[in-house]
Image (tube, grey):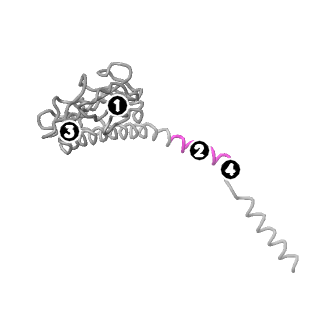
């Protein structure tokens, strides 16, 4: 009787080990289904990353301009918003991240990135946005009025990632000082409405 129980227990344990795990066929089917799902999700994931990059640069520029307006009124002195590159035309697109957007005292003569970093009241470093095509419409700088916080001219900041038809701009209105972000294209881009 003891021998029968022993062989019965032995057969139970042996049968449990026989059916553990996946077969090679099951593993291959599972991996192929997962790879198809990942391939369909990859394009939407890159679009999501691009949209977040554009929204981040837009929000940073809007916040920077709002701070520039407030700072000039608070200090009761005109301040300059200046876009600086060490090389290349500032009115052309560049995606190397070698630029700064600096809020400077009106007396500042900073013309290089290192000078702007030392003189700046506030600064946006372009290396955070490497890979984003960026340009401005102003040839030199904006001067923020000390009493109203409005610029002396309209400031426009343009950017896109890979597709120039999805260009977005941040506009600082000269008369009202209103800051807004919008899509340059008529259909909108990255959830920004057309201008």
Q: Is residue 4 left or right of residue 136?
A: right
Foreground: 43 or 36? 43
Q: Which residue lies under the disc numbered 1?
A: 116
Q: Tag 3 or tag 2, which sits nearer the N-term?
A: 2
Q: Nearer the viewer, mark 2 or mark 3?
A: 3
Name the spot of residue 148 as percent of width and height, x first.
13, 40
Magenta-tinted stretch:
24-36
Would residue 170 appear left or right of 133 to someone viewing this image? left
Specify which label sits upstream in the sequence, 1 or 2.
2
Task: Please identify, in this view, whether the residue under mark 4 or under mark 3 is nearer the observer.
Answer: 3
Give the number of the disc on residue 23: 4
Q: What residue is pinned by disc 3? A: 179
Vertical position of residue 46 compared to residue 158: above or below = below
Based on the displayed image, in which of its 4 quarters is residue 67 positioned? top left
- Mark 4–mark 1 Cα distance, whole angstroms, equals 64 Å
Q: Which mark sits nearer the N-terminus, 2 or 4?
A: 4
Q: Residue most toward the front?
A: 107
- State the image quarter where residue 190 is shown: top left
Q: Give the left or right position of residue 135, taking residue 148 as reference.
A: right
Q: Main secondary structure of the magenta part?
A: helix
Which disc, if any, is residue 31? 2
The residue lying at 33 percent from left, 30 percent from top is 160
Q: Label 1: state its secondary structure.
A: helix
Nearer to us of marks 4 and 1 is: 1
| Magenta span includes 128 | no
Closer to the eye: label 1 or 3: 1
The percent coordinates of residue 175 (x first, y second) are 11, 34
Q: Earlier in the sequence, mark 4 or mark 1?
A: 4
């Amino acid at each position: 009787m003891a021998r029968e129980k022993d062989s019965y227990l032995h057969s139970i344990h042996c049968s449990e080990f026989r059916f553990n795990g996946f077969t090679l066929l099951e593993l291959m089917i599972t991996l192929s289904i997962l790879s198809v799902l990942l391939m369909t999700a990859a394009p939407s994931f890159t679009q999501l990353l691009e949209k977040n990059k554009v929204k981040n640069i837009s929000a940073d520029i809007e916040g920077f301009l709002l701070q520039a307006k407030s700072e000039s009124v608070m200090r009761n002195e005109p301040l300059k918003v200046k876009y600086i590159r060490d090389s290349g035309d500032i009115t052309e697109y560049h995606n190397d991240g070698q630029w700064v957007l600096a809020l400077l005292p009106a007396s500042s003569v900073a013309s290089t990135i290192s000078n702007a970093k030392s003189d700046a009241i506030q600064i946006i470093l372009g290396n955070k946005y490497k890979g984003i095509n960026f340009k401005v419409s102003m040839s030199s700088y904006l001067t923020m009025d000390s009493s109203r916080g409005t610029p002396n001219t309209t400031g426009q900041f343009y950017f896109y990632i890979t597709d120039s038809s999805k260009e977005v701009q941040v506009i600082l209105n000269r008369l009202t000082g209103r800051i807004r972000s919008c899509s340059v294209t008529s259909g909108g881009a990255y959830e920004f409405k057309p201008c």
